[in-house]
C-alpha cells in the first residue's frame, strides 16, 4: 500500500444485503463499538455485502455512513455485491448490465471515501460452468472497466465459480481453475497496472459437507499464488485475498481444518483474508 508491503486482516460484516437493511448487531452495541473491537483485535479491513435493491434506495446512505465511520477508525472497506435482490445470494450470476448498474451507483456513492480498498464484483457465481470461464472473465473485465472509468483507483476482486473442481469439490466461489484449465486470466489494465486480485471462498465440511486437502486447495486456487510457471507461460504470483473462510469451530475436524488452512496459507505466503463473519447470526459459521 503506497509502495509498502501490506496484508489484509479482514472480516465480513453482513446485513445490508438482507431484509435488515443494515449491518447486524446494532440492537446490542452501536457501530462504533464493533469498529473499536475490530481495531483492538488487529483487524484492518471489512468486507461489507450489499444488494442492488438496497443501493437503489435511500438506504444506501446508511451504507455510506458505516463506511465513513470505519474510515474514522482507520479501517479499510471492500464493498461486496452479494446479490441483486435482498436475501437472494443463491440466484447466481445476473446479467452483466445489472452488475455494471449496481457498481455505477456504488462508485458515485463512495468515490470520495479514502478507505475503499477494493470492489468485490459479484458474490459466488456458482452457476458459471467450467466451460463458461472465459465469458465470465470477459464480463468481469467489462464491469471493472466501468468502475475504473469513473475515476476511482480501487482494486477489483474476482471470485471463483462453481463446485466442480479437481480432487475435492469446491465451495461456491472457490473454483479458480479456469486460469490453468482454460488459459484465460484477467488482463484489463484500464485502471492501471496491478489493480485486480483473485478472491476465492474456502470452507470445510460444516458448510460444504466435503473433506479437504492441501492438494485440493492447491489445485483450486493456491497455484495462482505459489510462484510456479504454467505451460502457457503465466507465472503464478497473482495478488489474492481469501474473500470468505470460516467455521463454527465446534469439533476436532473443524479445528483441524482451520489450523491446516492457515498452515497452508503461510506456506504459500498468502496473508490476505476476510473471515466470515463478525456477527453471530450466520447459519453456516456463527460469528466472531
Image: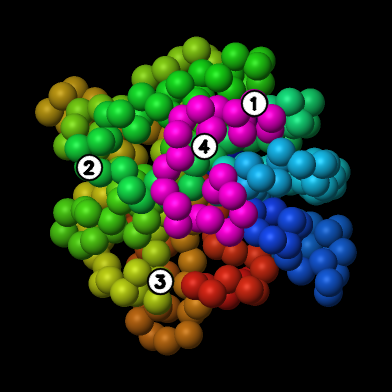
Nearest to N terminus: mark 1 or mark 4: 1
Percent across and percent down for residue 247 are 47, 72
Q: Quadrant of residue 160?
A: top left
- Image point 20% across, 37% down: which residue? 131
Few, some or many C-alpha atoms within 10 Å of disc 3 (few <14, some 14-19, many ≥20)? some
Nearest to N terminus: mark 4 or mark 2: 4
Whether tag 2 and tag 3 are in contact, CB under 8 A, the answer is no
- Image point 49% across, 72% down: which residue? 284
Secondary structure found at label 4: loop
Location of the C terminus by quadrant is bottom right
- Against 280, residue 85 (above or below) is above
- Whether residue 88 is in magenta: the answer is yes
Q: Does residue 240 show up?
A: no
- Image point 65% across, 59% down: which residue? 18
Percent across and percent down for residue 141 are 43, 23
Specify start and end residues of the magenta stretch as a single range: 83-106
Cα separation between marks 1 and 4: 12 Å
Cα separation between marks 3 and 1: 33 Å
State the residue position of label 4. 121
Tag nearer the camera, 2 or 3:
2
Cα separation between marks 4 and 3: 23 Å
State the residue position of label 1. 104
Nearest to N terminus: mark 4 or mark 3: 4
Q: Quadrant of residue 217?
A: bottom left
Percent across and percent down for residue 140 are 43, 29
State the residue position of label 2. 130
Whether tag 3 and tag 1 are in contact, CB under 8 A, the answer is no
Image mark for residue 207: 3
Tag nearer the camera, 1 or 4:
1
Cα separation between marks 1 and 2: 28 Å
Give the color scheme: rainbow, by chain, secondary structure or one colour.
Answer: rainbow
Nearest to N terminus: mark 1 or mark 2: 1
Amino acid at each position: 500500500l503506497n509502495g509498502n508491503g501490506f496484508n489484509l486482516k479482514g472480516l465480513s460484516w453482513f446485513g445490508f444485503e438482507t431484509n435488515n437493511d443494515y449491518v447486524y448487531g446494532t440492537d446490542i452495541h452501536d457501530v462504533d463499538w464493533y469498529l473499536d473491537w475490530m481495531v483492538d483485535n488487529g483487524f484492518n479491513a471489512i468486507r461489507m455485502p450489499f444488494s442492488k435493491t438496497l443501493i437503489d434506495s435511500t438506504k444506501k446512505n446508511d451504507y455510506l455512513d458505516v463506511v465513513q465511520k470505519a474510515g474514522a477508525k482507520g479501517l479499510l472497506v471492500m464493498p461486496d455485491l452479494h446479490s441483486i435482490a435482498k436475501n437472494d445470494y443463491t440466484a447466481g450470476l445476473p446479467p452483466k448490465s445489472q452488475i455494471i448498474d449496481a457498481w455505477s451507483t456504488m462508485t458515485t456513492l463512495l468515490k470520495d471515501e479514502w478507505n475503499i480498498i477494493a470492489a468485490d464484483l459479484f458474490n459466488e457465481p456458482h452457476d458459471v460452468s467450467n466451460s463458461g470461464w472465459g465469458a465470465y472473465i470477459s464480463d468481469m473485465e467489462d464491469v471493472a472497466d466501468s468502475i475504473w472509468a469513473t475515476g476511482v483507483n480501487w482494486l477489483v476482486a474476482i471470485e471463483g465459480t462453481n463446485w466442480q473442481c479437481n480432487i475435492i469439490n469446491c465451495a461456491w466461489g472457490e473454483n479458480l481453475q479456469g486460469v490453468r484449465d482454460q488459459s484465460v486470466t484477467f488482463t484489463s489494465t484500464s485502471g492501471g497496472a496491478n489493480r485486480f486480485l483473485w478472491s476465492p471462498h474456502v470452507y470445510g465440511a460444516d458448510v460444504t459437507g466435503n473433506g479437504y486437502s492441501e492438494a485440493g486447495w492447491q489445485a483450486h486456487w493456491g497455484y495462482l499464488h505459489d510462484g510456479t510457471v504454467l505451460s502457457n507461460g503465466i507465472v503464478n504470483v497473482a495478488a489474492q485475498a481469501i474473500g470468505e473462510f470460516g467455521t463454527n469451530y465446534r469439533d476436532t475436524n473443524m479445528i483441524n481444518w482451520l489450523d491446516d488452512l492457515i498452515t497452508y496459507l503461510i506456506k504459500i505466503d498468502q496473508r490476505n483474508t476476510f473471515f466470515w463473519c463478525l456477527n453471530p447470526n450466520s447459519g453456516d459459521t456463527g460469528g466472531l
